Amino acid sequence: MADLIIKNGRIVTPSGVVYGGIVVEEGIITYVGSNQGLPPGRREIDAKENFVIPGLIDPHVHMGAELGVPFKEEVRNQFPRETEGALHGGVTTFGHMMVVIPQESNLECLEELISAGEELSYVDFFSHGTITSELHLNEQPELWRRGVTSFKHFWNAYKGPESMGVLSHTDESIAYRSLLFNAEQGYPAVALFHCEEMDPFYVLAERLQKEGRNDLKVWSEARPAWIETKRMLDALLMAKGAGSPPIYIVHMSCAEAADMVTEARRDGYPIWGETCPAYLTHTCEMENEIGCWGKVNTSLKYAKDNERLWLWQSKVDGGVTNIGTDHCAFTRKAKEEFLGGKGKHGNIWKALPGLCGGMEHLLPVMMTFGVHKGRISIEDMVRVCSTNTAKVFGLYPRKGILAPGSDADIVLVDPNRERTVDSDFYHCRAEFSIYEGFKFRGLARTTIIRGEIMMEDYETIGKAGYGRYIPRPV
C-alpha cells in the first residue's frame, strides 16, 4: 500500500497535461499515469480535476534582510512566517540570497540560515553566495564544498550612496576572478548578476531632484532601461573572457533586457534571464495606486516592457527563462521610513527599495495574469517557475518535475478559486502589497513537500521545521 495517492488530476508534465494520478512512497514519486494504474494508498487525495503541478521554486528570496537588524535575529523572525506564506503561494523550495555586506562572512550566514531554516521553515531551501569583497572570494571554495554552487554579483548596484551605508557592489576584478572560479568548476556553477550602471544614475537623479520630482515614475527615469542593459552586456563580455561559465541575470525589468538574453541564447551562450511578478503586472506610471511601495531595483518600467516580458513561449528565444520574486519581508514602517522618508506618496528618493509578499503571490499572479489571460500555458508556467529553475541551480530532476524518482513536491491548483488581496490575504508578514485590491484567480489548494501534506484545502496543517536545506551536488 502506497503512502499517498493523488487521483483525478490534470497533471502537468514536460510532455503536456495528462489526466490521472500520482503515487508517493517515502517522500518520493514512484508513479505518474492513469487512474487505472493507481494502487491503494494509506492517504488518498481526490484532485477533483484541479491542475497538479510540481512545486514552484523561487530562486530569489532575501530572508533575514531587514536592514538594521542582525541577520541571526531577523532570519529566525522571518522563516516561519515567510515560508508559511510560500505554501499558500505554491512555492515548495526557495533560493536564499546571502549577505551583500562586504565584511560579513557568507559561511557564517550559511550556518545561521541552515540552523534557523531546519528548525523553523515549512519549505525546502538552498542558498546562493554573494561576492562583493576579497573575503567572499576567499570563501568561494568552501561554499562550493558545502553545496553552494551559485554566486551573486551586484554589478554595479549599490555603488556609492545607494549602498545605504552598509551594502556594497562587486568591482570588475572581483567579478572576473569569481567567474574564473566558476569556469574551473563547471556545472552547476552559475554566476548571478544584478545589473545596473550606477554612475550615470547619480547624474540623472541629481538633475531630476533639482526639478522637484518625487514620484514613482521619476525613479524609473533615473534608472532607465539602458542602465540595466549596459551592465548586462559588460557581464556577458566578461563571462566570455573568463571561459564562458553560465550566467543568470536577476530581475530583468525591460524589453531590451529580454531581447539581449534572446540574442545570446540564439548564439549558444549559456545565459538565463529572470524576471519578477511586478515587472509583468505593474508600471512606473502607477503612482496613485502604489506610490513608493513600487520602489524596487531594478525599477518598474512601462506597459510595453510588461508585454515583452510575458513572451515565454519559445524554450530557446523567449528571453525570460525563469521567474524569481526578489521577495523581501520589510515592515511597512521600514519600507517608508528607514532611510528618512515618510508616507506612501512623495517619498521615492527616501523609501527603502524592495517588494514584499512575493512567494505568497507568485502562483496567483502567474495564473491570473498569465494562464487565464492566455499569455502563457500552464506548461509554460511550470517550465519557467519550476523546471528551468531546478535545471539552472543543480536541483533537477530531484526538484522541478513530476516524475518517478523525484521528490514529491506537489501542488494542487484550483484554477477557478478567487480571492481579493486585502488585509487578511497574506500568511507571511506583508503589511502592504502592490497587489492590494487585486482579484486573483487560480490558487494553491493543497501543497505537499517531500510527500508531507503541509497545506490542505487552503489551510496550513504542517509544522514549521519540516523544511530542509538542499546542498547542490558538486
Image (cartoon, rainbow, N blue to C red):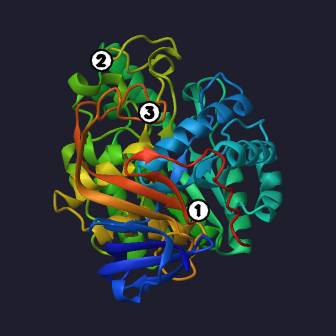
Point out the tag, 2 or 3, that comes first from the N-terminus. 3
Q: Quadrant of the C terminus?
A: bottom right
Q: CA distance from mark 2 to mark 3?
A: 15 Å
Inter-mark Cα distance, 1 to 2 = 36 Å
Residue at position x 48%, y 84% from top? 31
N-term mark: 1 or 2 = 2
Quarter occupied by residue 291? top left
Residue receiving disc 2: 213
Q: Which is closer to the viewer, label 2 or label 3?
A: 2
Question: What amino acid type should be assigned to the residue bearing mark 1?
Answer: Met
Q: Residues within 10 Å of mark 2 (few under 14, many from 20)?
A: some
Q: Residues within 10 Å of mark 1 (few under 14, many from 20)?
A: some
Q: Which residue is mark 3?
A: 201
Left or right: residue 242 compared with residue 281: right
Q: Nearer the viewer, residue 411 or 211?
A: 411
Question: Which secondary structure, mark 3?
Answer: helix
Residue 238: assigned label: 1
Image coords of residue 279 (percent x, y) = 32, 46
